[in-house]
Image: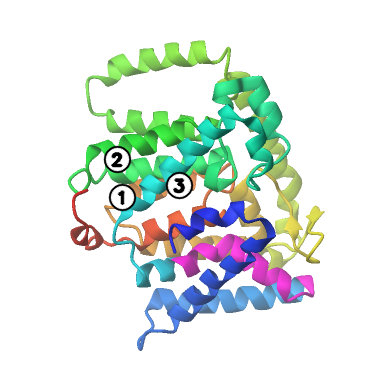
Amino acid sequence: MYVLSLLYYYLGSVRVIFSLYYAVGWVLIFSKERIKRVEFLTLLFVFLYVIVKVFQTGSFVAPLLYIRLYWGFIFLYFLCRRFKLKDPASFFIICAVLTIVEYIAIRVNLSIKDILLNYDGTFDRQVEYLGLIGGVHSFGANRTVTGSLMLAAYIFFDTRKEYYSPKIKYLMLFSSFICFSGTSFILMVVYFLYKKSKSKIIIILLPLLAVGVFFLQSIWTRIQWKYIEIIYIYKSKQIMDNFEFLTENFLSLLFGTAKIVTNSLEVESYGMLVGDFSFLDFFLRNGLIGLIFFIYFVYSNVNKNNFIVIVFLLISTLHYHVIFSFPGQMFFAYFLSLTEDSYQEQKLV
């Protein structure tokens, strides 16, 4: 199940078969004799959300697709709780190796990306302009998605050193690095600074970091201050231009708007409102009730073992759809499903 999830963006339209994962996860909510509070509230929220969205859109299919996009991780969460990943090291190693192999293959023969369905027409220019630092899409179909997910895997292994060989985490770190995502690169630096925040070595690391960024700016535009400033202005404008949709009426404020900027060609009333700002789009689509339930569900499943990796996944989603992509939903669901007892069941690898 976990390994197959890596194929999602390689399958094109055939990936609709992965809807079975959501269906099984939904059934598993009812599989217990006693339903816990978080499970009951999940059922209640999904029911209310679908009813409201059917009323707003006049469609039954569109609300199901919105549920799959924004809330797919909760069904995968119940799937992960039922079918536990007994050998996390092997799964994440496959993720890393797949990313590394794809990166090398495209550098050897660029035409390979024309066969792979996880690439779009913009990647050619990316490689031609940046060459080796042009990144790789891999299983996330996006440099930032894959880079952030592999960084999360690195953090997972790095924070549980007593259960895993230290060699594994460096494979995760390398696979994240070769995605050359500005978001994952910044988060990588933040994590390293966080680790060393109480050490005297931070006094040396900060000047070295500043020098490194200064020299990298000339070849990597995404870490230039000008680029960051442009992104900030762009995001601020997105908030100002779209927030009115959320406050147009009481129902939109509670459950999100039904407005669409880019409508899907296949499904009426389903489409994009805000691009490249995933949590803003999430808030606009799900409203205050959706935001509160999201916080509640995540908070209910966070513990000292998965806290850091969950936080970094959430931060990485501020820009691109990291936890809303299908592989991202699987990663997010897996980390949320971990309990303090989960680690005791795993052997040192």
Q: Name the residue under label 2.
A: 168
Q: Residue 108: horizontal and vertical position, in percent?
A: 57, 28
As drawn, 305 above or below 104: below
Q: Which colour scheme is used?
A: rainbow
Q: How busy is the neighbourhood of tag 1: few (under 14 within 10 Å), some, or many (20 plus)?
A: many
Can residue 306 be seen here? The reply is no
Tell which circle, 1 or 2, labels the residue nearer the N-terminal end.
Answer: 1
User: Residue 188 is drawn in which quadrant?
Assistant: top left
The answer to whether marks 1 and 2 mark residues whose Cβ atoms lie closer than 8 Å is yes
Q: Is residue 109 left or right of residue 60?
A: left
Q: Is residue 162 left or right of residue 18?
A: left
Q: Residue 144: horizontal and vertical position, in percent?
A: 55, 39
The residue closer to the viewer here, 22 or 200, is 22
The amino acid type, in three-letter code, at marker 2 is Ile
As drawn, 90 above or below 26: above
The residue closer to the viewer here, 257 or 275, is 275
The amino acid type, in three-letter code, at marker 3 is Leu
Q: Main secondary structure of the magenta part?
A: helix
- Which one is closest to the eye, mark 3 or mark 2? 2
Query: Which residue does the image show at 62% across and 61% down from the upper left?
Result: 15
Q: Which mark is residue 313?
A: 3
Callout count: 3
Magenta extent: 57-76
Q: Name the residue under label 1.
A: 89
